[in-house]
Structure formats: structure tokens, C-alpha cells
Image: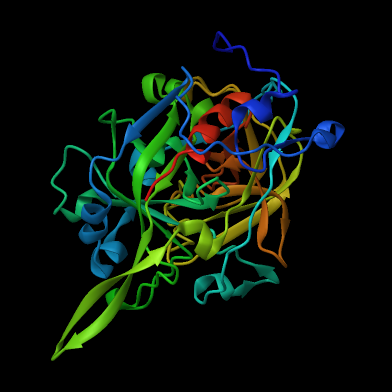
Amino acid sequence: MIPRARRLAVPLTGALLAAGVVGATPTASTAATGTATAIAATQAAPGDVTAKAAPQTPAEAVAFWSPQRLRAAKDYTEELGNSVKGFGRSGDATPDGRAGTVPPTGAGKSGTGGSGKISKQVNLPPTVGRVFFTLPGRNPQDPKSWKYCSGTSVQGHYRNVVATAGHCVYDPVTNQFYDNWVFIPSYWDGDQAWEGKAPYGIYPAKWFQAHDDFVVREDYDYDYAFVNVSSGFRLTPKKDGDVTRYVRTPAGRLGDNVGGQGFTWNRSTKVKVFAFGYPAGPHPDGDRPFTGRTMKWCYGRSAPMPAVPKYNIQEHIGLTCGMTSGASGGPWLMGYKSATRTGYLNGISSVAWDSDGNDRYDRISSPYFNGETYDVYKVAANRWTQ
């Protein structure tokens, strides 16, 4: 096992009130103390949080992505090669304090689109969608620079937070945050380039929050990030003779349109979860069962995963699931209710596993969410954006 000096976590008894995250509550044993009151001003980031403003303005990021470019984007995880073959002794992911919970919120108004579809009697959450970005240091006009991951809206005081993987905001190849980063909840890719669906709008990044140990050391035990997005825009097609042009109209705040999943940390490593995402990459044998055009899901009980020195992994939890790259950054939701389409985020798809060595991915894994994950989350949960 790779030696690691663990940071001291702030005890959660009473700490949630100090943290100032809206709706944050301890577990049932201390729930009687009441919910936390959100602070209006952004708190200073703790020492283990990297906070970085997006390289482009929201208007620039939204203007970059046409429906044709969105459809042409490829998943980046396949290029990064985030996968493991084989399976060893399970690791030792453990809580670093008391469990905590931030409740989810529903959308302020109803909407239509991909979120309304039912797949095998599971109502897909409108909060989940695709993250799009261009690679830093490359020509943004080159289609090879157009990439995507998965992500989800998560509850925050200003209804403007997207949770995804660390490698979906920060490039471990160039050691820079991505350019032209936007989030599209309930994205659906149509048969033609102009049929891509963004039923709730496009939301550009304003601030990135990631753990220092991922940014500095590429430690995948911290492969998560929380992004503050600005108010969104919708692209409305308008015919101008034989030419279709897209008019941008304001869409409002992300959480007002799709709601936000709850957040929880320091839970058992063995809980039942739904994992959602947009897989597209191949299995090791080259078979491509997914296209990335629509949202997919897996369901099962999580369990501790083995250590992987290649990625500095010591504390991942895993789930039996055949989703491939492209699903990276997709949420793991504990206590997901199909009726409300909400649950509690307790994981993020990070690495794919071929655990039995048959050249087919059969598991996905996530960093274990502990108090340090909460430290990163609460900075984003209290940061205001327009």
C-alpha cells in the first residue's frame, strides 16, 4: 500500500453549522440539532481545495458549442486510459468522521425532454447530463480537442453546482483546467447533428473546485470535482431560408430547472446505489456496446476495491457494472427514488475495471467520499454565481 499522510478531518459534531452549507445535517443521531443555515458570502477555500476560475467567460464558453460540435465531441476517458485489469485484496476505505447529509431538492418547475423517459421502470434523473470541454494547449477549432464526460447537478445554496470527476475538469496530461467547459443536463443525441437535445439549457462553468491531491499528485482517491456554473442558455433553432441558425435565450439557474441531488459522506462502503452516465468507449476487446448518445444506469451494492499504485488508489469503492469510458464523472446515488428522481450523491465514476481479465469491463469504481470530499463540496455549495 502506498503510504499517505492523512489530513486531520474536522469532527462533524457541530461542524456542519460552522460549515454553512444549506440543508446540511448530521445523521439521525444528531439530526435534532437542526439543519445548517447557509452563509451568503463565499468562504475561503480550505488548504486542501484548489479553486480556479474558468478560463473563458460564460458567454464565450456557450458561444463555442454549436449543436454540430456537441455531437462531434468524444469521451476523454478513453484517451486517458483510466482502467484497471485484475483484482487483488480489497482496500481499506474508512470514514474519517461522522456521516453527514445534505438533502436533495426538486426542480422549481417541470420540464420536458430526455429526463422524462423511463428505462426498465427507472425514471432517469433530469440532473444527470454531459459535461463538454476543449483540451487546453490545443487548437479549440480542431475536432480532436472536443471532449465530454458525465456529471450531475447537486444541491447548493445558489443552485449552481455540478459534480463530476476530477479528470473531467483538470487535464492530468497538461496539468491545466479545461477550456470552454459547459454542462447540459438530460442531454440526448439525435440521429442528425441538429437533433441534439438540451431540454433544460446549457450551463457554462464559472469556478472549478478540486482536491489538491488530484491537481498536484494525480491521486485518484480524490478524483472528484464540484463546478459552479452560471445561469444557462437555450439554443432555439430559427430557419433563415435554407439555413438553420440558433438563437440563445436565457434559461435561468440550473437547480431551478432540474433540481439538485443530495450529498452524503462517511457512509458505509457497502450500500446500494444507482450509477448513471453516458458510456461510449470500447471494452478492452474492442467491442463498443454503447454510443454515448443516451443516459445509461447500473444498480448494485458497492464494496471496497483493491489498491492500484498506478493511480495512487487506496480508498476506492466499486460496483458491478459494464459501463465504459464516457460514464466518467457520472453520479452514484444512494437512496435514489424513481418517483422523485432524487437521491444522495456518495460517489463519482472514476475508473473502469476488467476484474477477471476477460477483456470486458465488469466494474466501475469511485473515490470514497469522506470529510475531505465534503471540504471540497462545501466551497462550491456556498459560492455565488450570476
Q: Nearer the viewer, residue 39 or 368?
A: 39
Quarter of the image that includes the N terminus = top right
Image spot of residue 371 (x, y percent): 63, 25
Q: Is residue 195 left or right of residue 42?
A: left
Question: Residue 194: x and y, percent?
Answer: 29, 77
Q: Is residue 346 left or right of residue 233?
A: right
Residue visible at 17% across and 37% down in the picture: 137
The residue that appears at 33% across and 43% down in the rendered structure is 79
Q: Which residue is at 54% across, 24% downward?
A: 313
Name the residue at 28% across, 69% down. Answer: 67
Residue 305 lies in what quarter of the image?
top right
Q: Is residue 155 above or below residue 38?
A: below
Residue 62: image location, x then y, percent: 27, 58
In the image, is residue 122 above or below residue 282? below
- The answer to whether one can see residue 350 in this image is no
Residue 348 x %, y %: 55, 42
| Left or right of 7, for residue 218 | left
Please indicate, yes or no, whether residue 56 appears anywhere in the rendered image.
Answer: yes
